[in-house]
Image (tube, helix red, strand yellow):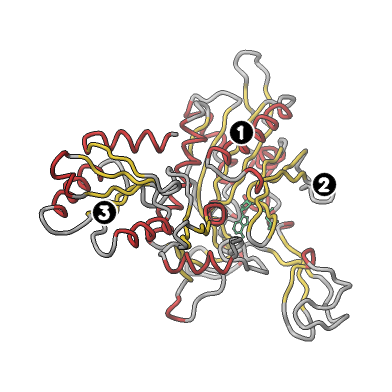
Amino acid sequence: AEVTMDKLVSLCKRRGFVFQSSEIYGGLSSAWDYGPMGVELKKNIQNFWWKEMTQLHENIVGLDAAIMMHPRVWEASGHVANFSDPLVDCKECKNRFRADHIDLSAPCPVCGNSGTFTEPRQFNLMFQTHLGPVKDDKNIVYLRPETAQGIFVNFRNVVQTSRVKIPFGIAQVGKAFRNEIVTKNFIFRTCEFEQMEMQYFVKPGSDDEWFNYWRERRMGYYEKLGIRGDRLRWHQHGPDELAHYAKDAYDIEYLFPMGWQELEGVHNRTDFDLGRHQEFSGKDQTYLDEETRERYVPYVIETSAGLTRSVLMVLSDAYEEEQLEDGDLRTVMRFHPAVAPITVAILPLVKKDGIAELAREIEAELREDFNVFYDQSGAIGRRYRRQDEGGTPYCVTVDYDSKEDGTVTLRFRDSMEQVRVHRSELAARIRKEIKE
Ligand code: ATP
């Protein structure tokens, strides 16, 4: 059976992945909270990305910049003037739409009336607030609508303190805020979300080569994460979509339950960002190549992915309903073992005769290395199903034989195969399975 958004939302609620924000007050539209399972999944995806960027590239360093920045940043970046979406209202049913998402000559998609749209007007997506007790125009600040600018304004700091040499990158994960006109599709598009961005600074002229490198590398990352290849594709920005500063831009799209949608952008931003910050701040943003003595404003190749959107992608991709031979239907979340919220479940076959105590010992041994969940209640088959639905890749069952010879049953989520492993070899075996 195909995964639908309704099925995902209901699994997420049932198993503690994602809850609606402020639910006991009727909920806040388009805001979501990550529950005990969701927070683990989100952190694991973030760590997977962070490792790919920083640990596997010697020349990429991390950063964690503030959400609130000097208001001039957003003038320099162009967000104050340009970061807006065209908005229309239906005069009949009062619903609001993004003008670029609907056909304005067609009837209203909600009430079906024709010719009832207002003229499009530009609506800036940045959330505004005031810093300090006085609310006037002099102390307006914005919640950042993207994490990238925190990287650009720290370019000099990083060059001066980290011994990095071009080409090099700065990676960052953090919250971003956009007052989106239309939020729907669960956590796909929300006003508060998280981004995982990496800006790679290169010498002008080498930008095409690095652009290609990063395109390949980013698609390879999703393959590493185990995402189904037939649900990933490239979309190149046409001349009408290309941002004014971008030389070339590709999006990685994923086939979500509601269709193909952007997951990540890989963009050649040229020297636009550093050039603008040099102009607006009056601070030199050039880089001196010590070998050739050349001085230039670097070009930027950007990879910009949504973390919360990646959570939805990973959930959609993992979801499967499988018809078993015994007639049962099992729902199984086939997460990559490195991002599964729980790595190992410890399940004593029975509680009595010291089996539970033995299982607790094994649990303690594994806890240092893995995210472990202990469950001793209910029939073993039902306990396996619960773990399948939560996406736990490995279950360890402790039984009477375990007391005799120290072996346990290791059960694999995807194949449901079971093997006997000695408890002293369990941690190494699981570590090996995760890597494969
Ligand atoms: P759109 O045109 O769909 O509004 P965008 O092209 O402006 O999106 P970018 O500015 O390129 O998006 O943002 C980079 C990434 O950040 C996107 O690929 C997406 O994964 C994520 N992202 C952007 N806006 C949101 C949002 N409102 N909610 C969740 N994730 C978002």
Q: Which residue is mark 1?
A: 217
The amino acid type of the residue labelled 1 equals Arg
| Residue in view at x 62 percent, y 41 percent | 303
The amino acid type of the residue labelled 3 equals Leu
- N-term-proximal mark, 1 vs 2: 1
Towards the viewer: 420 or 85: 420
Q: Which residue is mark 3?
A: 347
Quick one: quadrant of the C terminus? Answer: top left
Q: Which mark is residue 4?
A: none
| Residue in view at x 60 percent, y 25 percent | 166
| C-alpha span from label 2 to label 3 | 54 Å
Q: Position of residue 97 (x, y in %)?
A: 74, 72
Q: Is residue 232 above or below residue 176?
A: above
SS for tag 1?
Answer: helix
Q: Which picture quadrant has residue 309?
A: bottom right
Asked if disc 1 is less than 8 Å from ligand 1, the answer is no
> Could you tell whether 5 is left or right of 161 in the image?
right
Q: Quadrant of ligand 1?
A: bottom right
Q: Which residue is mark 2?
A: 238
- N-term-proximal mark, 3 vs 1: 1
Towards the viewer: 41 or 255: 255
> Could you tell whether 387 is left or right of 102 in the image?
left
The amino acid type of the residue labelled 2 equals Gly
